[in-house]
Image: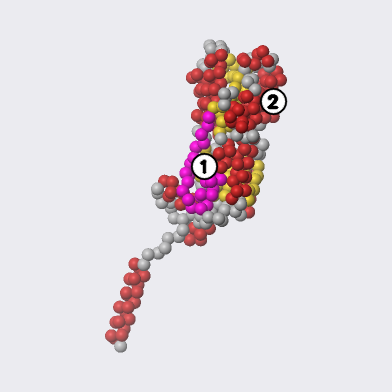
Amino acid sequence: MKKLSMVLAVILVAVFMLAACTPVDKPEQSASAQATEQSTGEAAPASASAAADKSAAPLAAGEFKKLGLVHNMQSWQMYQVMEKAIKAQCDAAGVELVVADANGDANKQLQLIETMMNSGVNGIIVVTIDGPTLEDVAKRCTENGVALVSMYIELENATANMLVDEYKYGYAIGEMGAQYMAENFPGEEVEVALLRIHDYLPGIDRGRGMEDALKELFPTAKIVNDQNSVDVESAMKMTEAILAGNPNTRMFLADSDDTGAIGAYEVLKAKVKPEDQAKYCVIGADGVPQAFGYIKEDGMYRGTVALDNKEIGNTAFAIVADALAGKEFERVQYCSFEEVTKANADEYLKQYE
C-alpha cells in the first residue's frame, strides 16, 4: 500500500512539472497593437483581457464591409474631391460608405463617430476638428477593432494619421504672394489681409507661416487685417469689410481656397477695374477645381498651394483596408503639396474633368 502511494505521488509531481513547462498561447494582438509593432519594431503592451483582445483583433481579408467618413465641413470642395475618391474605392471593393458632416462642430463630430462605431462600421476616416475632443472615442474605436484614420490633426489613439506640415504649408502660401509683389512692386509698401480659421490648428499654424514668409521675403508688406473666415460666404463678407476699412489692401492670403481665397477673389472681381488688376494678388491653398479655373483666367488669383485631394482619399482608404487585414502601413503619413500658378493650372484642372 505504501509503495502504491509513493508511485502515485511521483506521478502527480511529474504531471505538475510538465504543466508548468508547457507554453501558454498568447492572446491575439489588436489591430492597433500590430500596427505599432510593425511601424516601430516594438511590441505593443498586452491587453487587459483575452475578451478585449478578441474584440480588437484585426479582421480577415474580405471582412471589410462598411466604412464611415466624418467630415469637418462637407461643403468644402477639397473634401468633396476626397469623398469622391473614397466612394470610388468603396464601390470597387464592395464596401458600403456612410458619410456624415460635423459642420465645424467638434462635439457633433464626436457624437457622429460614436454612432458610426456602434452601428457596425469596420473603419472610420475623420477630418478631425479638435484633437483632444476625439482622443477617447479614437481609443475606443481601436480597442474594438474599428480602424480610425485622422486627417490633418494628429490623434495619439488613432490607428493612423494623415497630416500636413502646416507651418511649411502656410509659408508656401506667403512665399507665393511675396514673390509676386517683390517681382512687380519691389520696395513698395503693400497692405495685406489674412483670411484663415482662427480656432482650428491648421489655420493657426498656416497663419504663422504666412506671416514669417512675408517678413523674410517681402519686408515692405504690411498686414492690416487678419480675419476669421470658414467658407466662401464668410470670406466675401470679410473681404467687403476689409476693403471698407482699408481700401488700399492689395494682397489677400488665405489658408484655403474654400475658406478664403475664392470669396476674396469674387469680391475683388466686382470692385477692381481691369486696368488695376495687376496691382492685386490673391493666394489660396488646398487646390480645388474652382481655384484652378480662376488661376487660368490670368486675373488677380495668382496661385494656390495644392494638395492632391484625390490621392489623399485613395491613401486613406488603403490605410483602413491594410489595418483591418493586419498588413503593414505607416502610422503617420505626411501629404505632399505643390504650388499651382497660371503655368500649370490647366494641367491640374484636367485631373478633375
- Is residue 230 shown above or below 9? above
Report the front residue among 189 and 75: 75
Is residue 329 located in the magenta-colored stretch of the structure?
Answer: yes
Q: As shown in the figure, which amino acid type bears the numbered disc 1?
A: Asn
Q: Residue furthest bottom?
A: 1
The tag earlier along the polypeptide, 1 or 2, is 1
- Expressed as whole percent of the image width and height from the top left, the position of residue 201 reads 55, 34
Residue corresponding to mark 2:
237
- Expressed as whole percent of the image width and height from the top left, the position of residue 313 reads 57, 41
Is residue 169 located in the magenta-colored stretch of the structure?
Answer: no
Q: Quadrant of the C terminus?
A: top right
- Neighbor class of circle 2 (other Cα within 10 Å; few <14, some 14-19, many 20+) is some
- Expressed as whole percent of the image width and height from the top left, the position of residue 309 reads 58, 36
Q: From mark 1 to mark 2, how far is it between C-alphas?
A: 34 Å
Residue corresponding to mark 1:
161
- Is residue 54 shown above or below 112? below
Q: Residue furthest left?
A: 3
**Residue 114 appears in the picture as rendered:** no
Rendered residue at 67%/36% (across/down): 75
Rendered residue at 57%/19% (across/down): 223
Q: Is residue 112 left or right of residue 147?
A: right
The quadrant in which residue 258 appears is: top right
Magenta region, residue range: 316-338
Report the front residue among 205 and 68: 68
- Expressed as whole percent of the image width and height from the top left, the position of residue 41 reads 40, 48
Q: SS class of the residue under badge 1?
A: strand
